[in-house]
Image (cartoon, grey):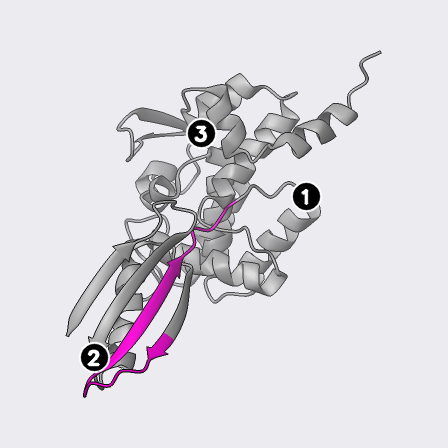
Amino acid sequence: MVIVISWLSSNFSCLIIWLGILAAFEFPHFAKRVCSLISSIFSPPKLLLQVKYIPCRYTMQIFLLEVIYMQQVVLPIKDSNVLKEVQDTLLNNFKAGRRNYTIFQVGKATLLRVSDVMGLKQTDIFNLDGSIKQNAFIHDRKTGKPNTLYLKPVQTELLLYRQWLLDHKLASEWLFPSIQHPERHITEKQFYKIMSKVGDLLGINYLGTHTMRKTGAYRVYTQSNYNIGLVMHLLNHSSESMTLAYLGLDQASTENMLNQIDFG
């Protein structure tokens, strides 16, 4: 078997990989394995698979496998009604709905990266008597910098969630444990699948693991009189342009906001 890989584009929004495969009978199984491998490399995956048969006069057949990787564009949820639908779906449409909902609420309120949300431990959040700490002190996994989390905005959700953990006898050091393996926390890939399912149920194509952080940042921005400096600080960004792009504030969004301002 000979595999020829040609990179036709380095644009991460549409990465096209051509695999010229010289094979006889195992191609379908091989194609499935290739897709699985690429899915594990590019997570979360959005793969389109096309199989083309090329007639050949030789004993073996030539197949062309075209795999298109498309990076999903994740945007903040700007509409409050849509936000409520997403939160209600997380809470009510999954076996571990209370956990999924609380993950989203904590990520939205703290503006943490998803890896930091999943890495939270119960001792980071709860006092020995089960009450909620006013602040949590962690180190960002990506930057290594210390980060102080203000937990009051999600105090009610965390108390309800703690009771849910007790009711379901989920004893774990992790704040958001896996249901099947409580000794581990839920993974980013698992939460991506949850958010993707929510998107499918509601017909929304811009949901992902960054949705909660981007949505929280957008709400801070719009409800703080557009204090971009505050949002930059909370997100640990180095420039306003980076933060505006992260918030999904394109020219149309900016013009819409300007239309609502009375310049006198």
Q: Position of residue 120 (x, y in %)?
A: 33, 42
The amino acid beneath tag 3 is Gln
Sequence-earlier tag: 1 or 2? 2
Q: Position of residue 81 (x, y in %)?
A: 70, 48
Is 222 drawn above or below residue 106 in the view shown? Answer: above
Q: Is residue 174 left or right of residue 234?
A: left
Instruction: Tell me what residue is drawn at x 63 percent, y 47 percent.
Output: 83
Instruction: Tell me what residue is drawn at x 35 percent, y 46 percent.
Output: 118
Residue where numbered disc 3 is placed: 134
Is 32 drawn above or below residue 166 in the view shown? Answer: below
Residue placed most toward the observer, 49 or 158:
49
Q: Position of residue 109 (x, y in %)?
A: 51, 36
Callout 1: 10 Å neighbours few (<14), some, many (20+)?
Answer: few
Q: Secondary structure at mark 2?
A: strand
Instruction: Tell me what residue is drawn at x 43 percent, y 50 percent.
Output: 162
On residue 79, which mark appears? 1
Residue where numbered disc 2 is placed: 23
